[in-house]
Image (tube, coloured by chain):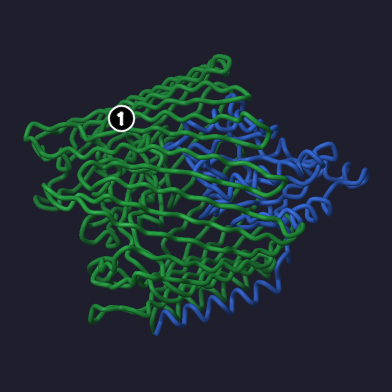
Amino acid sequence: MSKRLVVVAIFIFAIFMANNSYAGKKKAFDFTLNDLNNNPVSMKSLLGKGPVYIAFWATWCKPCKNELEIVSKIYDEYKDRGFQLVGINEDAGHSLGKVKSFVKSQKWNFPILLDKNEKVKRDYKAFGLPYSVILDAEGNIIHTAYGFRPGDEVKVKELIESHLLTDEADSTAKKATE
Amino acid sequence: MNRAFYFFIFLLLTLIVIQTVQADDVSIQTQNKLEYYLDRNPTDSGVHNDSLRNRLTVDMLYGNFYAGIWYEAFEPITRLTTGDTSYEGITQRYFGWTDGNAEIRLGNYYANFNRGLILRAYENQDVQIDKNLDGVWASYRGNKFNLEALNGKILLSENILLSPLIRTRENDIVAFRGELTPISNISFGGAALRYKKKNSFTSEIEYTNAQEITAGLTYGPFDFYADYGRQEGNEGFYIGRPDLKTGDATYLTASFSTGLFGISAEYKNYYNMALDFNAPPSANHRDQSPNALWAQSGANDRGFQVSLFFAPLNNWTVEADIAQSGERPDEYGHIQQKIFNNFYEVRGYIGRNILILNYERTDTGVEGLEQLPYGEFTYYLDDDNTITLTGQVRKLERIRDLFGKDDYNETDYSISFSHSYFLSITVYGGFTSEEFQPWEQSFPKRSGAISLGLRYGEHDLNIFYGDQRGGFVCTEGACREVPPFRGLKITLVSRF
């Protein structure tokens, strides 16, 4: 009986909070991770130019590969207008050895960061893969999603386009991230 | 008043706090994952026919400070394990400070040193592992070095074989890790750990000490990495040598990567490294170690894996994985489990439609030979709408006894329709060459299921109804037998 009460409470809570989504800005957790060449890349260094698409992925995750291949085409289209795409790899200790050889063969031209101890995954509550987080240029979370199916890119593209910076917004975002 | 009442009060207070303090310098993120299972075919008397798991997480950021809390309720179908494993309450809470380079955290946390040879305290619900620590964790990231230190009590299963979900938190870990990167393509590291454990039979305090050294080098397209760990104090229970109190582990990788192809090779050699809190790499495409049947990562085996990624044409990739490993021999002549695992995949685009074909062959020696051809094709009806077809055959040549073998086959297929971001409907079908009754639950030769997925804003709802075959699930080197399921599953993930 008590479990049923918990479920009811959760639903009430969910419905109430759904109506209050985006009541305040949701700041993303800061992180610094190494890329495939061992150079540190911080989340803050990605901000201030435009929307940021963070994709949590692993080499063993089939839909993750679909997602990165498809979103990388959007990246090619909008990178000159400030759109940032970053893949955070979650192979961790177990299949980390094959990540670089896989990525290089894919010819991806966006940064791949290694979350070796899975801390960033836990900070972002990515309890399953694929998991994506879209940030605005100031580092606020504007959208999150579990899973990726071909065709989802239509919505992704809409979100990216609606958060590209105009010249005026560009200077505001740069000030906000300084 | 029961705990559910307090939980309800907790929710309301959280809600009030969130609504009160929402401001530019405060950020609150909440996520709830609800899973409900209704099994329409329980056979054991006294077995719950439904199961509930709920996890609510609330995180707050305020400047450089953060705090979080997890509230969980879990009532499993008792067939999955023995003993009363239901729980409900606050399972994790933490508070911390970070400026991006330095971080200190009090409360619950997970930890992983390097490749997990001496420390990997992690969670994986697929194999029902949760080894979170409760204590203090600190790290510092400098230009040329990283430091990490921790002290805490680890959550462990009381009995990993009989009651993996009954957990205790009694034993302490103190650990330290450092890494030096004098130039960007060279790194050296070291780690040390001390584990204080109360012996459940003698009640005496026992200590395990472990150390680890690592080295990495990047030179043009070449990458090399070496990791060596050793332990002293942990008995060799898993290898039938309780008198043995020492063990060691070596893990090596080398890779060569270009724009056309990449190749990586891994080598592992572990002996008596099955600690309560580590998980060395399995070096196997299906993430399975020879002795992982113990629901514990393989830590007494030797083997290798070679992986090749080849992209001969634009948007087409060929992958080949060849892995072989076996348990280290012991002096008593026990049968040593082996795994020969090969995996091949072709993946690419026809226009914008996606084709995936793969084949996996696994020979475990003791259990038999398994072959798994798989195909998947996704076709775009238009920009928003896609149809995906999948098909898989599992062909098993089973070793029944010393003199005989027999064949067992499973065929599964599915068709799925997806409308961009909002809706997906999948119909599954399958048949097997024989009816089987694992876990005292019958599963028919012919099975079917339907699944509906809906996404609205930050909410994901999935409803599954039908039959799902059980099997052996392996992730991160640890494995678990999952029973078949016939009934209704509802999953709702909400983020606020």
> Would you name the residue on which mark 1 appears?
B303
Q: Residue at x 38, y 53 (%)?
A: B394
- When the figure is inspected, residue B447 is found, relative to residue A26, above or below; the finding is below
**Residue B79 spot, x, y in % from top left:** 27, 70
In terms of image quadrants, where is residue A49? top right
Which of B69 and B495 lies nearest the eye of the viewer?
B495
Asked if residue A35 can be seen in this view, the reply is no
**Residue B116 spot, x, y in % from top left:** 37, 36
Count of marks, rendered view: 1
Q: Which amino acid, by three-letter code, is at mark 1?
A: Gly
Q: Which residue is drawn at 56% across and 15% down?
A: B183
Of the 4 image quadrants, the one containing the C terminus of chain B is: bottom right
**Residue B36 spot, x, y in % from top left:** 45, 73
B403 left or right of B305 in image:
left
Of the 4 image quadrants, the one containing the N terminus of chain B is: bottom left
- When the figure is inspected, residue B255 is found, relative to residue A46, above or below; the finding is above
- When the figure is inspected, residue B373 is found, relative to residue B232, above or below; the finding is below
Which of A74 and B401 lies nearest the eye of the viewer?
B401
Which of B65 and B35 lies nearest the eye of the viewer?
B35
- When the figure is inspected, residue B398 is found, relative to residue A38, above or below; the finding is below
B317 left or right of A163 in image:
left
Colour green, chain: B
Which of B385 and B232 lies nearest the eye of the viewer?
B385
**Residue B240 spot, x, y in % from top left:** 11, 40
**Secondary element at tag 1:** strand
Question: Callout 1: few (<14), some (14-19), or many (20+) C-alpha neighbours within 10 Å?
Answer: many
Q: Which residue is drawn at 58% across and 28% down?
A: A36
B397 left or right of B94 in image:
left
In terms of image quadrants, where is residue A105? top right
Colour assignment, chain A: blue
